[in-house]
């Protein structure tokens, strides 16, 4: 599926808004923003793998997949816009990217017991282990 409005590929001019959304989340808080510098977003943008939801010129959420390793790198929605289906559509979009890259399964990590874990499990993801940092590894068939 190639998404239509309000989803589009991000460009480098979007990075400040993406970083704002990433910093605004209530769970999976990035305690040290230096761990995810602007250039990290740029890598996914340059690979045409970072999608965003935009309405009336405002970016409300974004998601990115790493087609090199079959993982979902990011899925974040502005907390003021949660519950509208933005996350579901963005997740579907990046999973389509991974399918087109011929991955049979997608993986991601998230904090155990979080709303994110519940979101992914409702979408059919299952536990595949625990990462070194204690995060839960989830995966789904594509």
Image (cartoon, rainbow, N blue to C red):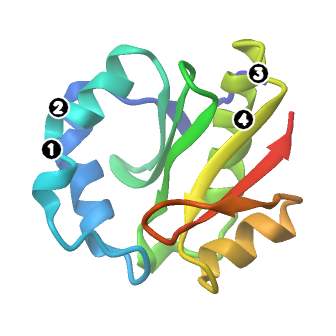
Give the quarter of the image for residue 122: bottom right
How far apart are the two marked residues, 4 and 3, measured between alpha carbons?
A: 9 Å
Q: Earlier in the sequence, mark 3 or mark 1?
A: 1
How far apart are the two marked residues, 2 and 3, measured between alpha carbons?
A: 25 Å
- Above or below, 62 relative to 112: above
Q: Which residue is mark 2?
A: 39
Q: Quadrant of the N terminus?
A: top right
**Residue drawn where x is 27% and y is 69% of the image:** 30
Q: Secondary structure at mark 2?
A: helix
Q: Earlier in the sequence, mark 1 or mark 4?
A: 1
**Residue drawn where x is 76% and y is 21% of the image:** 103
- Can residue 6 be seen here? no
Q: Nearer the viewer, residue 115 or 18?
A: 115
**Label 2 near label 1: C-beta < 8 Å?**
yes
Q: Secondary structure at mark 1?
A: loop
Q: Which residue is mark 1?
A: 37
For this view, does 89 lie left or right of residue 71?
Answer: right
For this view, does 122 lie left or right of residue 24?
Answer: right
Q: Residues within 10 Å of mark 1 (few under 14, many from 20)?
A: few
Q: Which residue is mark 3?
A: 103
Q: Where does the image place residue 70, in percent across and percent down from the top left?
A: 64, 29
Q: Quadrant of the C terminus?
A: top right
Give the quarter of the image for residue 101: top right
Q: Nearer the viewer, residue 134 or 29?
A: 134
């Amino acid at each position: 599926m190639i998404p239509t409005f309000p989803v589009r590929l991000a460009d480098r001019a979007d990075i400040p808004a993406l970083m704002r959304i990433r910093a605004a989340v209530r769970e999976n808080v990035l305690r040290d923003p230096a761990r995810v510098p602007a250039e990290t977003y740029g890598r996914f943008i340059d690979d045409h793998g970072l999608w965003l939801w935009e309405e009336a010129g405002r970016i409300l959420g974004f998601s990115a997949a790493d087609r090199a390793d079959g993982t979902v790198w990011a899925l974040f929605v502005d907390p003021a816009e949660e519950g509208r289906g933005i996350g579901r559509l963005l997740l579907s979009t990046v999973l389509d990217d991974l399918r087109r890259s011929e991955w049979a399964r997608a993986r991601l990590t998230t904090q155990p017991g979080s709303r994110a874990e519940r979101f992914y499990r409702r979408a059919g993801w299952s536990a595949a282990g625990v990462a070194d940092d204690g995060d839960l590894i989830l995966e789904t068939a594509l």
